[in-house]
Amino acid sequence: MKTASINAFGSPDAVVIGQRPVRATNPGEVLVRVQAASVNPLDVKMIAGHMQQVFPVKLPYVPGTDFSGVIESVGAEVTAVKPGDRVVGRTTPNAGGAFAQTVVVAVDDVCIIPADMSAEQAAALPTAFGTAQQALFDFGQLKRGQRVLIHAAAGGVGSMAVQLARQAGAYVVATASARNTDLVKSLGADEVIDYRTQDFATTRDIDLVLDTVGGDTLAKSWSVLRAGGRIATLVEFEIKSTNGHHGEFIFFASASPFLPRATHMFQVGHLQVITDSVFPLEEARSALEKVATGHACGKVLIRVDN
């Protein structure tokens, strides 16, 4: 099968297109013919070798966790899905494997997708939706009537978080560039702050901040919190609670608990999937470089031509 893989850690330039054998399925696994894969900031970090202490991998390594496709074959103990079913799923970062024509995963890690959902829309869901859900509700304990500040609200996680927070009845303040203001408002933001020309630090009485940027943005975010407020960060591993405020790095582990809800929300028209761009597998380097800029609007995706 064709893959985009690395033989050494480095920049996206380290990615090469090549061939690898298809792995046989174990009894509880399925073989999926990949149609689309989502590119996440974590993939860039994995390729750079920055995650070796958390997610150690052996080289050569095929990056990518989020995928959608069609079940090709199933293990002897699998009954929940069958060959021909369209599914979405997520592998562990250690395993990777989504930037390839096929991937083998545990059957519990896939979810059947609606007929009206495209492969690209499905592949965009696992990490972005699951991370937003975990940050807002599992850690953030966001409730109706509370105020949430979502940074980089036009990004993959941010665009999901705006929709989930609004549907939960929260008042949503978002940061984005001027060109994405209308988009973010259409997703449900009550206020949009242009981070290039306006200072979000003038905002007050925020119950929860979702930080996808880190650095100065995270440092300034403490000042907007009300007493007992929380910051969920996707960037800073060593965030520490301070002055009665709570901070936590969101360590996203598994999409499986969230995928049924995500696909249902899409099916009933309660979830938009924002796509920045779609690259063929042969241009996986370009897809990773786009994500590495930190300025993608929605999700960057790889289309796998089988």
Image (tube, helix red, strand yellow):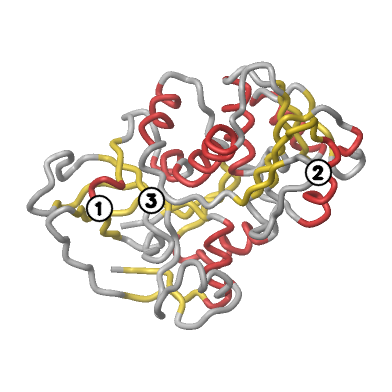
| Sequence-earlier tag: 1 or 2 | 1
Of 104 and 69, the residue lying toward us = 104
Against 234, residue 283 (above or below) is: below
Identify the residue under disc 1: 106
- Number of numbered discs visible in the structure rendering: 3
**Residue 40 to residue 176: above or below:** below
**SS category of the residue bearing label 3:** strand
Point out residue 92 in the picture as x, y percentages from the top left corner: 39, 58
Name the residue carrying label 2: 243
Residue farthest along the front direction in this orientation: 244
Question: For this view, does 138 lie left or right of residue 203?
Answer: left
Left or right, 160 with respect to 18, comes to: right
Q: Amino acid at mark 1?
A: Ala
Q: What residue is drawn where x is 12% and y is 41%? A: 79
Q: Nearer the viewer, residue 12 or 158?
A: 158
Q: Nearer the viewer, residue 34 or 156?
A: 156
Q: Residue at x 40, y 69 (%)?
A: 62
Give me the residue at 46% from left, 77% from top: 6
Pointer 3 residue? 90
Q: Earlier in the sequence, mark 1 or mark 3?
A: 3
Say what amino acid the circle numbered 3 marks. Arg
Q: What amino acid does circle 2 point to? A: Asn
Q: Quadrant of residue 103?
A: bottom left
Q: Of callouts 2 and 3, which one flags the residue occurring earlier in the amino acid sequence? A: 3
Say if mark 2 contacts mark 3, CB within 8 Å: no
User: Looking at the rendering, in which quadrant would you find the C terminus?
Assistant: bottom left
Please provide percent x and percent y for residue 279: 51, 56
What separation in Å lies between label 2 and label 3 (alpha carbons)?
37 Å
Residue at horizontal 33%, vertical 69%?
2
